[in-house]
Image (cartoon, rainbow, N blue to C red):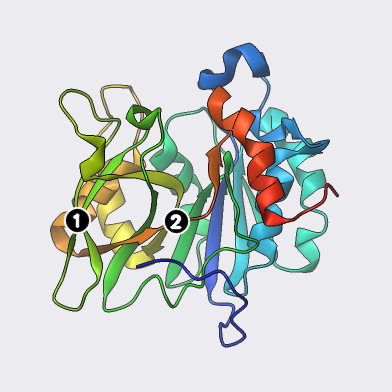
Amino acid sequence: MEPRHENDATQSRNETCVLLAGGAGRRLDRVTAGLNKHLLEINGRPALGYVIDAILATTSVERLVVVTRSDSLMSIEALLERARERVDVVMRLQARPAGTLDAVVTAQSAINHDSFAVHYGDNLFAWRQLPPLRAALRNDAVACLYTVHPPKDWRRYAAVTTVEDRDGESVVAGLKEKPVGGYDCGNFRSLTGFLRFDTQAFLRASPRVRISPRGELELTDALELMLKSGRVLAANVRLAWADFGTERGLRAAPGVIAARGLAPA
């Protein structure tokens, strides 16, 4: 399944988007010096602004829940001024960087739709708006993962293996966080920082997750539990993508923005 990127006038506003913008930026220590990586400037503008643009252009998003940290709150609030005119904006503060699942659970009380998206704020895509909801969660899928061909530094990302079901759908068969050992990157795709969930399925799985060896609550651990109880679909992203939480991704980010045809605001 490949995500669609054109405007879809039939989409109703029936989705919450959780935007994760509070990471510690450990992979960019030399660049951020402890500052919030989401506020790094790309083409003269805070990077998170480009992510917010894509969310605002998405016809299915009615509520935007932004999870950040207290020292970034004022700066991110300023980026959200225009967003408040378009969607319902809710802020949530993460007490400490305790993992991606911890961040989504921090937003959980503000999710008021049957489905929701999670967007890592340090991921830039060349699409102008997020793919429509209805094409993502269908046939009783509990989640949809957006994947890319493995980049050179693929061991930094979760590996997603898929099979094709009887209806020709790409269904997730396995998931491995930051694979090590004898993995052949030709046999899987890498998970990006954009995912969609059925809300009730997520609420059933998230309390069962245990702290990982890294001392964090990992979103991929929740996904592994969901795989055991429901269908998880995979959508192949073929447009340009950059995770600017890494130095390689930060260098690639201006090219992704240029591919969108967007001038700096």
The residue under the point 66% across, 35% down is 38
Q: Is mark 2 on a helix, strand or loop?
A: loop
Q: Is 115 on the left or on the right of 244, as rendered? A: left
Residue 232: percent from the left, percent from the top? 26, 62
Residue 122: percent from the left, percent from the top? 58, 38
The residue under the point 62% across, 77% down is 7
Where 114 sits versus 157, above or below?
A: below
Tell which residue pokes out farthest to the bottom in this image: 10
The kind of residue on which mark 1 rests is Leu
Name the front one of labels 2 and 1.
2
The kind of residue on which mark 2 rests is Val
> In the image, which disc is placed on residue 227?
1
Where 228 sits versus 178, above or below?
A: below
Name the residue nearer the viewer: 251 or 67: 251
Can residue 11 be seen in this snapshot?
A: yes
Residue 189: percent from the left, percent from the top? 31, 46
Residue 200: percent from the left, percent from the top? 33, 66
* Image label count: 2
Residue 89 quadrant: bottom right
Distance from disc 2 to disc 1, alpha carbons, whole Å, reads 21 Å
Residue 215 quadrant: top left
Can residue 245 be seen in this snapshot?
A: no
The residue under the point 55% across, 49% down is 240
Judging by the rendered image, the residue that carries numbered circle 2 is 237
Name which of mark 2 and mark 1 comes first in the sequence: 1
Q: Is mark 1 on a helix, strand or loop?
A: helix
Q: In which quarter of the image is the N terminus?
A: bottom left
Where 118 sits versus 212, above or below?
A: below
Name the residue nearer the viewer: 34 or 202: 34
Q: Is 29 on the left or on the right of 210, as rendered? A: right
- Density class for disc 1 (Cα within 10 Å; few <14, some 14-19, many ≥20) is many
